[in-house]
Amino acid sequence: MKFMMVSRIDDQKALEYTQSLGIALKEKGETVVFEEETAKALGLPGFPLNGTEPDLVVIIGGDGTILLTVQKMGEHQLPIIGINWGEVGFLADVEPGEAADVLFAISDGFSLERRMRLSFSAGDQYTGDALNEILIVTSRPAKMLRFGVIIDGILCERFRADGVLISTPTGSTAYAMSAGGPIVDPRIEGVLLVPLAPYMLSARPHFIDSKRSLEIQLESAKPATLVIDGQKSVDLGTQAKIGVKKSPNPALFVDIGRNFFEKVDQKLRRL
C-alpha cells in the first residue's frame, strides 16, 4: 500500500513522529511518501497531494490540519485517516500510541465512510466546499448583521445576529455545537443553520434536508466576511446571496469501526 504522510508543520514533535511513523511503515514493506510542505519541514523530497495518487493519506495533527488537507485536495478527495496531535481532535479517530498497529492492520484494505461536504456560492461565483462549516460574520467587530433564510424559493425567516453558521453534520460537533446547535449523526445528510447571538430569542437553529434549495440573503448596512472551515476567507460586502448545496465530492474517511456516539462521549463529555 502507498501511504502519504501529512503533518502539522508548526510542531517539531509532530514532525518527528510523522517521520518515525513513515520509517516504521517502510520497514514493513509499505511505500511511503511525504506531502510537499511536510517534506520541506523535514528536509526530505516531497510530493503534492494531487497527482501522487496514494492509497491512503495519513494526517498527523488536530482537526485544523485535517480540514486544511481536505481543502487542498479540492474536487479529487483521497482516503484519509487522522492521528490526533491536537486538543480534542474530533476528526481524528486514532491516537499516536496505537497508530502503527492500526495502519498495519488496514494495509491490506479498508472500508470508507463518506462525509458530506457543502458547496457554497456568492451570487454566481463559487466560493468553495466545507467539511465542517462556513461562518458569516461582520467585518467590523461588535456590529450585527441581518439575514434572510430562503428555502425552496420561499423567504422563511429574517433575523439579526452577530453572524450565522452553516454546518454539515460532521461540523455539528465543532463551532456549531459551541454556538448552541445540536449534535447530529454524520450519516444524516442535512444542513445545520445556527444563528450566532441572535437579537430575538425566536431565531433558533434549523436542520434542513440537503435535497432542498437553500439560500442565505445578507441584508445589512455592515460589510461581512465568509470563512470556510476556518481556512479561507471571502469578503461579501453588505449585500450578497449565498447559495448552499450538497457537494458532489464528499470527504473520504477510513472507517476503523469506532462508533460515533462513543466518540462523542470520549472526546466531548469527558473533557
Image (cartoon, rainbow, N blue to C red):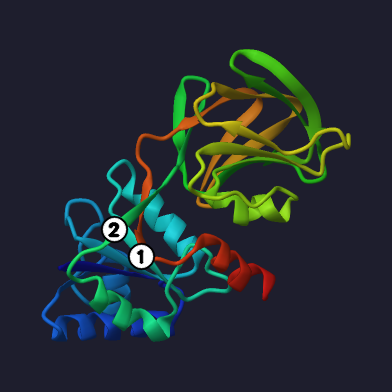
Q: In the picture shown, does residue 237 fall above or below 201?
A: above
The three-letter code of the residue at mark 2 reads: Ser
The image shows residue 147 at horizontal and vertical percentages of 73, 27
Instruction: Read off the residue under disc 1.
Output: 81
Residue mark closest to the camera, 1 vs 2: 2
Instruction: Tell which residue pokes out farthest to the right in this image.
Output: 200
Q: Residue at x 24, y 78 (%)?
A: 104
Position of 106 with respect to 84 (left or right) is left
Q: Residue furthest top?
A: 153
Q: Residue furthest left?
A: 29
In which quadrant is the N terminus drawn?
bottom left
Circle 1 packing at 10 Å, graded few (<14), some (14-19), many (20+), is many
The tag on residue 32 is none
- Against 253, is 270 above or below? below
Q: In this view of the protein, which residue sits in the foreground, 64 or 221?
A: 64
| Nearer to the camera, 139 or 73 | 73
In the rendered view, does 126 fall on the left or right side of 183?
A: left
How many callouts does the rendering have?
Answer: 2
Q: Earlier in the sequence, mark 1 or mark 2?
A: 1
> In percent of the image, x 32 and y 77: which residue is there?
102
Instruction: Give the quadrant of residue 161.
Output: top right
**In the image, what residue occupies the spot 75% across and 22% down?**
157
Name the amino acid, label 1: Ile
Q: Is residue 207 left or right of residue 43?
A: right
Q: Position of residue 80 (x, y in %)?
A: 33, 60
Q: Which residue is mark 2?
A: 111
In x, y percent, where is residue 58? 31, 68
Question: Please, what secondary structure does the residue beneath circle 2 have?
Answer: strand
Q: Position of residue 148 (x, y in %)?
A: 71, 23
As measured in the structure, the alpha-carbon distance from the residue carrying label 1 to the one carrying label 2 is: 11 Å
Quadrant of the rendered structure where residue 34 is?
bottom left
Quadrant assignment, res 236? top right
